[in-house]
Image: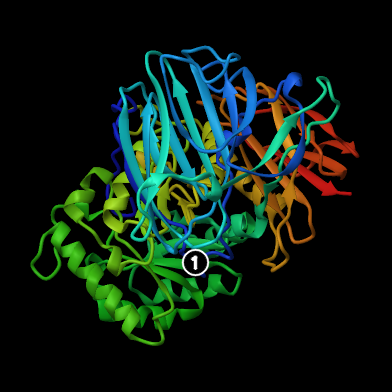
Amino acid sequence: MLDSKLNTLSSDASELGGSDRSFSALESSPYFDERLPITSQASAEATLQSSLIAAPDSQSSGLTAQYFDNPDFTNPVLKRVDATVDFAWNYGSPDSKVEADAFSVRWTGQIQPKYSETYTFETLSDDGIKLWINGQLVIDHWNDHAPTTDTGSISLLADQSYDIKLEYYEQGGEAIAKLFWSSLSQTKEIVPQSQLSSSFLEETVPGQANIALPGEQARSASAFIDSLGINTHLRYNDTSYGRFNDVIEPRLIELGIRHIRDGGNNAELFEKLNRLAMSGIRSTLVMDPKDDISPTEAVNIVKRVAASVDAVEGPNEWDVNNVSTYQGQGNYAGARQYQTELYRAMKSDPATAGYWVIAPSLAQPENADQMGSLRDVSDLGNMHSYAGGRTPTSDYDWRWMPLMQKVTADRPIVVTETGWHTADHYTALQQPNVTEQVAAKYVPRQYLENFNWNIRRTFMYELIDQKPESSQENRFGLIRHDGSPKPAFYAVKNLISLLNDTPSNVPLGTLNYSLTGNTTNLHHTLLQKANGEFFLVLWTNGISTDATVNQQVTLNVSTPIRQATTFLSNQSTNATGQYVSPTQITLEVPDEPLIVKLTPA
């Protein structure tokens, strides 16, 4: 938003067919403390019944294959190593334990490319199939279909191992699942067994007390905290942002977020930015000719507030602002020209060359074709992925991610705007309101979900309701117009307080665990602090109401743990439970974050 209205597609948008995606696993950026792969959410959804309880064995070539006697990854019936994914079961079955129709398979392990190149992965499937490489969704064709080829590309390094996960389901009729790869130096072939590996779990005695699983590598707690941002309008002195001294500055410091997104060109704004920098709060600045900021002036602004700047960003939502022009060119051509000049101006001056330049934002990703490719004049892509009153990351897989790649291709993404408004009685279909309690559930989940998607930073919209009027534009804040915090403010504040850590070069560890029970829509993020403590954050990602809805989940841990402590961060930073030397904990997981701190023995 910032200056323009928001629209989102309705939730009944039809699913896309075959996909063609492109991501990069090679990008590294000081915009984050670090960037590590994370196991996709679906890894938390697998349940191991007692007949499949296992002990870890040595590395095996091929992929671990878990077969389920349902198309929704429930009722596991078989676990084995498949040398490759090259199956044409046709009207038959993968195994006598699996029915010929209505089954699913999840293959997991590591893949090691032979060349440092962009690889094209190709699947031939009937029915649905999804492929993740290095935690990135590369192929997504998740519906019933006849034999169909889908492709996706990702840049990989030679002889480096990357996580791979392939999910497949068969509804009825023919059953086919094949995985190919190719590159400039690699002829197209079925991904060979020699380049695949997995930690296979052999079946042991049913009823064994503990479940030992291959470890999931944690991600840095500090990196997660560093991914959190919030939008502000510090120059809007005729709104609640005019109360900088008694509301805005102290509330920002109290909240604990380290990054804001703002913009403008006036001395008072610059003074506020530099003042916030003294408290460790840095800025991403929107550079827009509508604010009388030329590319040359943008460079001068960055120099003036150098200590407070993280990055600069191109024009804001010009796709829905038909009056925006630059050098006589209309919205799309003008935005492209400005971004090109902005990028060149920033990179040609040694004083600003090290700052990241973010692509212009689009209110509607469907306008990506008209904007055209800006990959060569952008360090980072940009999304305004509002959920339209729905759950976090709605439409990411089929809409936002593939469409925004048309603008910045394999560049990492920053979500510079997202959020929910709490305007009473504002129920427009494109952006319906939610209650303050529901927003408090969605906001921290959005931060966590985006981190799992490897979004570099997420700027929630926005810090404070600008005016007292109960309208959509004036009710996105974490703080009410009078300066009093909404529940979402405390939800974020407590989350930061519990997970905050200082950046460190200490190697991150792995946690051996599994989750069983009611794992429907169960999502998770595994973090670790520099002191070695793990923080497993769990939540359910369904539609929320004011009522708390819990699902009973059992956490089975085989990594030796001295103590486990649970927290409900939306409520407080006080512990809700403690467990000494646990191997199994029964949890009530709500639709808001449940944090399990695990202190290794």
- Give 260 or 140, whichever is nearer the viewer: 140
Does any portion of residue 452 appear in the rendered image? yes
Q: Is residue 544 left or right of residue 81?
A: left
Please give the residue where the numbered disc 1 appears in the rendered image: 28
Q: Extreme left residue here?
A: 328
Residue at the image point whose x is 59% and y is 39% from the top: 487
In the rendered image, the vertical position of residue 116 relative to residue 82, given as above or below: below
Residue at the image point whose x is 30% and y is 35% from the top: 18
Q: Extreme bottom residue here?
A: 350
Residue at the image point whose x is 59% and y is 19% from the top: 74
- Give 78 or 463, whichever is nearer the viewer: 78
Q: Which percent across, then down, holds residue 147? A: 31, 26
Q: Which percent across, then down, holds residue 586? A: 78, 26
Q: How many marks?
A: 1
In the rendered image, the vertical position of residue 165 relative to residue 544, given as above or below: below
Circle 1 packing at 10 Å, graded few (<14), some (14-19), many (20+), is few
Residue at the image point whose x is 36% and y is 30% from the top: 426
Q: Is residue 279 left or right of residue 506?
A: left
Q: Which percent across, then down, holds residue 371? A: 20, 55
Q: Of the residues shown, which amino acid type is indicated by label 1?
A: Ser
Does any portion of residue 423 appear in the rendered image? no
Colour approach in the figure: rainbow
- Give 183 or 458, whichever is nearer the viewer: 183
SS for callout 1? loop
In the rendered image, the vertical position of residue 160 relative to residue 208, given as above or below: below
In the rendered image, the vertical position of residue 232 relative to residue 592, given as above or below: below
Q: Which percent across, then down, holds residue 80? A: 63, 30
